[in-house]
Amino acid sequence: MHSFDRMGRKVHYRLDGPEDAPVLVLSNSLGTDLRVWDAFLAALPGQWRVLRLDKPGHGLSDAPAADLTIAELAEDIAALCDAYGLRDLNFVGLSIGGMIGQELAATRPDLMRALVLMDTAAKIGTPEMWTTRINAIRENGIVSLEAAILERWFVPAFRKTDQFALWRNMLIRTDDFGYTACCAAIAAADLTESTRALTLPVMAMAGDQDGSTPPDLVRATAALCNAEFHLIENAGHLPCVEHPKHTAELIAAFFNRI
Ligand SMILES: O=C(O)CC1=CCC(=O)O1
């Protein structure tokens, strides 16, 4: 368990695996912490030096003092990579984590080797949609939206498993301000032009039942940067949780092939 200081707030991160292994960076979605990758990592073929971190107000990281931007969230990762001398990143970004990956690929191409966009897009939703969500959370807390969020995250069969209650706990224990600060970052971001200009290898995937970033939205972002696209069947917004083995094998094969 480690932390580093960024603009007066502590960022929780983990760096695991052999120092000489290829570097894998895993960037989480809104309302999840770095445990969203646990089953995926257990199923991942090969050896990797794995960096994971909690966004502000998520997991064990301090909440931010103000709204965030995707650029600031990307700088958190870049600062950590610079501090450790991590280069040639194989980056997997889930949802807002994928926006952070697109931003990093555009602004710090010296760091990046390849990018996987998991259930994400160059632009997610509309500013009005995010403002509605932010206001609802400010008034009534994240608990007031949990049912709708969890329906987008998981398919009905997964919502009947024992695990489901634990993922719900992760979501509702997210700091309300940390969550809305990240919503504000998504609301303000349109990465279409910078993603269109990317030249690194990109693979995209989406759960067939993802209610947050539906397959057609992810396909459209994949088309911007000539990414191959994979549809994950019987999956919602978090296919690394619902199908850890399948997604881990697809991603390892991509990083090993390019
Ligand atoms: O709709 C949700 O809550 C899921 C989501 C959208 C962006 C993100 O990171 O997660």
Image: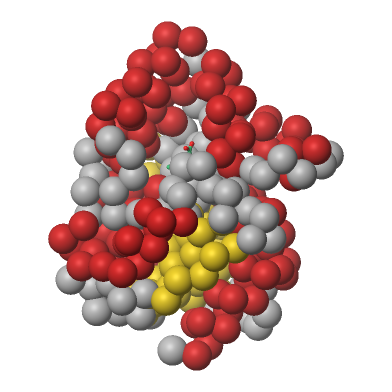
Q: Is residue 115 left or right of residue 248?
A: left
Residue under the image location 56 percent in, 28 percent down: 148
Residue under the image location 21 percent in, 48 percent down: 190
Closest to the observer: 12 or 183? Answer: 183
Task: State whether residue 61 appears in this view.
Answer: no
Residue under the image location 57 percent in, 83 percent down: 253
Quadrant of the rendered image containing residue 217: bottom left
- Rendered position, 37 above or below 157: below
Residue under the image location 39 percent in, 23 percent down: 133
Residue 206: percent from the left, percent from the top? 51, 59
Residue 32: percent from the left, percent from the top? 55, 42
Closest to the observer: 14 or 135? Answer: 135
Color style of the picture: secondary structure
Closest to the observer: 123 or 43? Answer: 123
Quadrant the C terminus occupies: bottom left
Residue at the extreme bottom = 257
Q: How many numbered marks, from 0 up?
A: 0
Task: State whether residue 135 appears in this view.
Answer: yes
- Rendered position, 97 above or below 197: above
Q: Is residue 43 left or right of residue 73?
A: right
Residue 198: percent from the left, percent from the top? 23, 73
Residue at the extreme top = 139
Residue at the extreme right = 162
- Rendered position, 139 above or below 215: above
Residue 63: percent from the left, percent from the top? 42, 30
